[in-house]
Amino acid sequence: MRTGFQQELGELEANLQEEGAIVLRALRGTLNALETQDVELADEIIAFDDEVDDHYHNLEKKIELLLARQTPVATDLRLVLAVLHNNIRLERIGDQCVTIAKLTKLTSHLDMKRSLIDGFEEMGSRAEEMIRIAMDTFGRRDVEGAKALVALDELIDRGNRNVTKQVLALASEPGLQEWGMRMIVVSRCLERIGDNAVDIGEQTAYVVTGEFREFTDASHPDGRAL
């Protein structure tokens, strides 16, 4: 029975990694749609979220069944809880991609500022890298590797702050105001994707150490990593 249980745990992790790959596809498509202002591609991303949701719900059901039939303890229980947590984070990243795709459609007829769009590509590429690192380090139980997400997240945070400054500077350009306000939401979505990747990384530390601690200490002004 123990062998079967370990096999089920392995299947949960494999399903989670599959969901991570699907979310990465969604994010890349979202960034491409934003970059090219491709409304049809944005529609595809919105429809593709059904696949993300299907994986999310299927994995959630598998976890519920496993918990109902088994009584995992210690590291096994932490792993199940971490997979459940990360499943939620990946589904949220999918939702954030949908929000960006919808905003791409909503603003496709408006004048835009090219430099801001180029900045989103940089932020989005970093977010992609963070998701890959988060999923890879979770699979390898690499706590130190997961902690590297903090530095990458700060780069996305800086990009988000820069977007806000640029949009505020558009106040003197009436034709760009509506577009700029919508782009603040796009920037915030990319920033939240980075945060979700960090959350996944923190679950790696939880599985390995048995303690949940955020990688950064919000109670200190410098937000230093633990």
Image (spheres, helix red, strand yellow):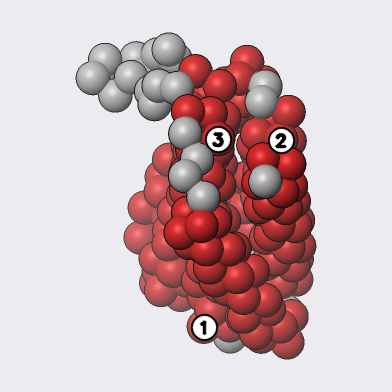
- Disc nearer the start of the sequence (1/2): 1
Q: Distance between the residues labelled 2 and 3?
A: 14 Å
Q: Are marks 3 and 1 in contact (CB under 8 Å)?
A: no
Comes first in the chain, label 2 or label 3: 3
In this view of the protein, can residue 28 be seen by the observer? Answer: no
The residue that mark 2 highlights is 139
Identify residue type, mark 3. Answer: Asp
User: Where is mark 1, residue-wise?
Assistant: 106
* Amino acid type assigned to the residue bearing label 1 in the image: Leu
- Which quarter shows the C terminus? top left
> Which of the two marks, 1 or 2, is nearer to us in this view?
2
Q: In this view, does 73 lie above or below 186?
A: above
Residue 170 position, x and y percent, is: 42, 58
Between tags 3 and 1, which lies in front? 3
- Measure the alpha-carbon separation of dots 3 and 1: 45 Å
Crowding near the residue tagged with mark 2, few <14, some 14–19, many ≥20 C-alpha atoms within 10 Å: some
Q: Is residue 140 above or below residue 179?
A: above
Q: Is mark 3 on a helix, strand or loop?
A: helix
Say what amino acid the circle numbered 2 marks. Answer: Gly
Tell me which residue sits at (40%, 21%) in the image. Answer: 211
The 10 Å Cα crowd at callout 3, few under 14, some 14 to 19, many 20 or more, is some
- Look at the image and tell me whether residue 127 can be seen: yes
Nearer-N-terminus badge (3/1): 3
Numbered tag placed on residue 76 in the rendering: 3
Residue name at image x 71 percent, y 35 percent: 139
* Residue in the image at 69% along x and 30% along y: 137
Of residues 151 and 162, which is closer to you in this image?
Answer: 151
Alpha-carbon neighbours of circle 1 within 10 Å: few (<14), some, or many (≥20)? few
Under tag 2, what secondary structure? helix
Q: Quadrant of residue 109?
A: bottom right
